[in-house]
Amino acid sequence: MTHRVLVVDDDPTVAEVVASYLDRAGFTVDRAADGPAALARAAAERPDLVVLDLMLPGLDGLEVCRKLRDEGPVAVIMLTARADEDDRVLGLEVGADDYVTKPFSPRELVLRVESVLRRTTARAPSGPLLRGGSISLDPAARRAAQGDVELSLTIREFDLLAYFLRHPGRAHRREELMRRVWGWQFGDLSTVTVHVRRLREKIETDPATPTLITTVWGVGYRFDPPPDPDTSPHPPRTPDRPEQDPPL
């Protein structure tokens, strides 16, 4: 299967080089020079992945990413000209799967594209529903709910929650989560931090004082689902004592 990649960058040299490397790697490549053109191309033929420059004229990359996500799931790798952590965090918070800082190696970008697509298009694992307290998750259907309310999760948020549900009560280092959930052997660990924060905002009663995904200082994070009241064992009932005649 040939994956379709949309490259969005207003710098024609960057767009040309990126498109050339992706084409040689076997991808079907489309290009757009600004936000409106990118949305129009994506509406005409949905891409599997978008390489999206953060700084675009008229409609910036963050807004383009939001609008793309509103239309349905799509993998996004954000390009940013600055190494500012705020830029990276903003990109991840609107749903980008990865980011690359300019200047970058085109070969590295191709590897990032392949890595993200492997993860996002991998065959969904089969098996029973995953449960943790009031949270239920169907890996095959890619659906998750908390009680009767369906959760709106990005691809990475869904995979992160599934991993936590499979390993409750264990402390996980961020490096481990990056390997197991993202499939990366290296990368900026703020990626994990941002996604944990986003997931907390969607499942915690009070994200400022989380009780489901707790921080284990010096280690990482632990998922501690509360017991499901419908399945929690009830305390043993003390048998009634037979009435006795009062002592004489």
Image: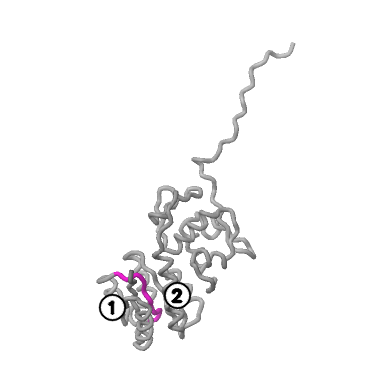
Q: Residue furthest left?
A: 44
In the image shown, does 208 or 83 lie closer to the viewer?
83
Percent across and percent down for residue 118 are 42, 68
Q: Residue furthest bottom?
A: 13
- For the residue carrying disc 1, how many other residues have a C-alpha within 10 Å: few (<14), some (14-19), or many (20+)? some
Identified at 68% across, 13% down, the residue is 245
Identified at 50% across, 50% down, the residue is 132
User: What amino acid type should be assigned to the residue bearing mark 1?
Assistant: Ala
Q: Residue furthest right?
A: 248
> Disc 2 marks which residue?
112
Tell whether position 116 is magenta: no
User: What amino acid type should be assigned to the residue bearing mark 2?
Assistant: Arg
In the image shown, does 227 or 179 lie closer to the viewer?
179
Q: Quadrant of the N terminus?
A: bottom left
> Based on the displayed image, in which of its 4 quarters is residue 123 positioned?
bottom left
> Based on the displayed image, in which of its 4 quarters is residue 17 positioned?
bottom left
Q: Is residue 15 visible?
A: yes
Relative to 195, residue 58 above or below = below
Residue 105 falls left or right of residue 66:
right
Percent across and percent down for residue 130 are 47, 51
Q: Which label belongs to residue 241?
A: none
Percent across and percent down for residue 89 are 48, 72
> Disc 1 marks which residue?
37
Relative to 108, residue 202 above or below = above
Magenta-highlighted residues: 46-55
Mark 1 residue element: helix
Percent across and percent down for residue 71 are 31, 65
In the image shown, does 41 or 118 lie closer to the viewer?
118
